[in-house]
Amino acid sequence: MRPLHQRMFDIFALSRPRGLGFGDRPPIAAFCSEDGRAFGALTRCDRTGFFGVDCMRRRTDDVWATTWPDIRLMRYSEARIILEKELASGVALVTVPAGEPVRPSLAKLGTKGASSAFELLNTPSHRPAAWALNQVYLAFPRPDKNWARDCQTGNFHTRLWEAYLLACFREQGCTVKQDMPSPDFLIERRHGDVCAWIEAVTANEAPYDHVSQTADHLLEDPPDEIERQIGAASVRYAKTIRSKLQKNYATANHVNGKPFAIAVADFHAPGSMVWTREALMAYLYGVYAVVEGEGLERVGVLKTVTELLGAEKIPAGLFSNPENSKLSAIVFSNAATIAKFNRMGFLAGIRPPGLKMMRFGTIFDRRPGIFDPIPFGLDVVSDEYAALWPGVGETWSLELEVFHNPMADHPFPHDLLPECSQWFQESGEIRCAARYQHSILSSRTLLMEASNEFK
């Protein structure tokens, strides 16, 4: 066996039932077999100091199967012997259990071919994204039978959003279940004592060509700050969320009495997710922000709104309506992108020769009285980039946000997804609790070879 890159272990470990949740037995070293068919971790108990072993091996359909769960403690010498045995090369792949469907290959195209977005993953510059997406797909406990085909064709963005969510949930140590047709996920902590059902949806009226996201094709945000926050983008979120609420997931027998959330991402047009976050907040809480005054006299002012712009006159303040008390929260991210998967694969060690990634964008400035974000531009493998989030570097969950419904019958537990930003009402004000100081508001990833754009 040989040492395994920590970032690659973190992605492989998304296939564990609890992902990166190791409790009081954190991994202290990771290894893989020489043939790449098995990986494992040497763990150490915080309470006793004794060691454990946690190993998985590929099945014949490439899904990771647990071969040695970390259920007993032992001395270091015994743990090493077990690791050497479990991670031996030349061992047969694990057979798919009887009654469990074989996972279709994401790389093998069906008769409908592939969309331009999926074809982009087959280019050298996006090989890290292809690898990362495939690893997350293989980590799904029970994906829809059409998942691979949908991802390859017209529903690429929907499946990308689901994959991103799974990566976030497992990264934060949640047990993820897909035992029911809907909602999409049941996520749990502490043996189910803390849990929530989550239904994923994308706010796109029609798919767009992800490949054409150049500076000339990106959708510019409306220059008028009121239109940007309570205009067309907010209306689009309202319609998308309303369509899911009308399905009454929260009253189903298996959901009733538990927190229920809708996870929404905006794939309306190239670049739309860069700026539409404010529109979602305005719709949910019925307030939007404007900056008044000039120079040192600038102040942020919250404006109350009861109705979104447009002929349909859609009410604003979804969370103010008692009729929506079955909805516990809205989960959101603007990072369910090919670029995100590309960066995570690149950080894990999938690095085509000559490929360099630079990330440019803005960071939320938390200083009182500051209204402009902090610009940044960094190499994604640089120490400066990793230092934005000390001790962890870039993770899947950094851009994930939970907007809590203050009128929910069954509130969304704050400690269910502890790594993401939590928005909630307290003493009549909207507050945010963020795990890390630096929150990326928007960004783009530039792929380079030396000083030229990577082809």
Image (tube, rainbow, N blue to C red):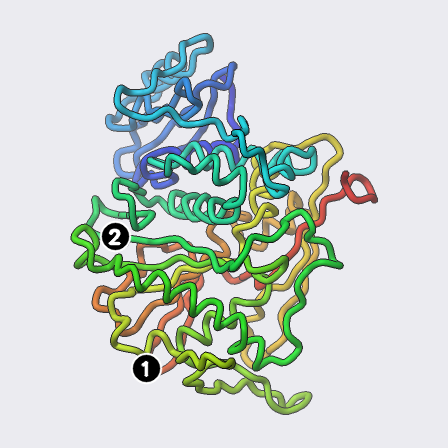
Is residue 6 or residue 351 the one in the foreground? 351
From the viewer's perspective, is 75 left or right of 235? left
Give above or below for 350 relative to 301: above
Question: What kind of residue is marked 1?
Answer: Ser
| Label 1: few (<14), some (14–19) or many (≥20) C-alpha neighbours in 10 Å | few
Q: Where does residue 146 sit, x and y in percent of width and height?
A: 41, 36
Where on the picture, by quarter, is residue 56?
A: top left
User: Helix or strand or loop: what does disc 1 sit on?
Assistant: loop
Q: According to the image, label 1 marks what residue?
A: 427
Task: Name the N-terminal-most of marks 2 and 1.
Answer: 2
Q: Where does residue 436 sit, x and y in percent of width and height?
A: 48, 59
Q: According to the image, label 2 marks what residue?
A: 195
Q: Where does residue 280 sit, x and y in percent of width and height?
A: 47, 69
Q: Where does residue 407 sit, x and y in percent of width and height?
A: 26, 74
Looking at the rendering, in which quadrant would you find the C terminus?
A: top right
Is residue 368 or residue 122 the one in the foreground? 122
Is residue 265 or residue 246 the one in the foreground? 246
Taking the spot 49% from the left edge, 68% from the top edge, the residue there is 236
Question: What kind of residue is marked 2?
Answer: Cys
Residue found at the far right of this picture = 451
Taking the spot 44% from the left edge, 27% from the top edge, the residue there is 104
